[in-house]
Image (cartoon, rainbow, N blue to C red):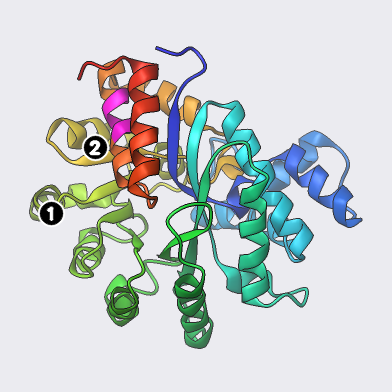
Amino acid sequence: MNQNGCYIDLHAHLDGSVTVDIAKKLAALQNIALPTDNDEELLALLSVPDSCESLNDFLQCFDLPGRLMQTPEGLQNAVTLVLENMAQDGVIYAELRFAPQFHTLGGMTQEEAVQAAIAGLKSAPIPGNLILCCMRGEGNEKANEETLALAKKYLVKDHGVTAMDLAGAEALFPTAKYLGLFEQAKELGIPYTVHAGEADGPESVRAAIQTGTKRIGHGVRSMENEEVVNLIREKGITLEMCPTSNRQTHAIPDMKQYPLVRFLESGIHVTVNTDDMGIERTCLSKEFDYLKREFGLTEEQQKQVVLNAADAAFASEETKKQLRAQVLAAYGASL
């Protein structure tokens, strides 16, 4: 195998992927004063330790990155810098997701935020695409409708917006409440993924399956209901699993029971992703190292996981074919 790694990240939040070095660069570019110049203190603001106590501790880490991405310059450079960090770790393709409605505090419109993020893809060292997040919540229906309309307006197969997502407080705002949103996406021809089975249980995953989605973000708590697990397998749904994130947010009580390898061995299309690289102090090579160390993931299984990601990418068939060829070249062509 290529010692530099060969990975694909399908589930990475832009704001959660801001590391100390990226924060410093974004602050300098925009003449924004950071709360501290000390790297350790910045790290504490941007990330959680492995001993993260709650989802609230985790969510507080989004505050500072959000403040650094309220201008077109900040957002554009954030996209490029995150993809640069990923490339250094051996990532060959990534899909970055963000909610345009969270980038309007400094006067940008949602559309200007989308345009800035697309511009950031153009300078990146690896191919990447954008997933626009609609958000669970109260009173943001119009903002979500605008996000959906922008996903349609800027929809392309490569180097731009390729899908939409539903993110946010899953346990407070159940997936079933948003089935109409996905009906609209389907009518508009927008591919989509759904955060489900992370903070809420298997019924959330069942609701996500009802939307007709081909991908589910996390999906880890489907393990609590064998019928839901079987549905995922039967419908060929790809799970965007994020081990470190699930460990830190306590998505499941006992990581020894983490079902990723079991799902993979049972024929489910599993992928491995970072979710929030900066907040979790992780990267894809670390995710795979963790799975090898704790769950005995083999090289052959790792290859299958990365091939699953190539097949499930929201990209053109030509790009997916190229990614698959790169993966096979890196890991060896035999399956």
Question: Is residue 325 at all visible to an observer of this figure?
Answer: yes
Please, what secondary structure does the residue beneath circle 2 have? loop
Mark 1 or mark 2: whose residue is earlier in sequence: 1
Q: Quadrant of residue 103?
A: bottom right
Residue drawn at 30 percent across, 32 percent down: 307
Q: Which residue appears at 21% of the width and 58% of the height? A: 202
Q: Which residue is mark 2?
A: 259
Query: Of circles 1 and 2, which is in front?
Result: 1
Image position, residue 125 (x, y; %): 62, 36
Q: Which residues are magenta?
A: 302-307
Q: State the quadrant of the N terminus.
A: top left
How far apart are the two marked residues, 1 and 2, measured between alpha carbons?
18 Å
User: Residue at label 1?
Assistant: 235
**Looking at the picture, how far across and down is residue 210, in whole percent?**
18, 69
Residue density around tag 1, few if under 14, some if 14–19, many if 20 or more, within 10 Å: few
Determine whether 244 is above or below 74 in the image. above
Say which mark, if any, is on residue 313.
none
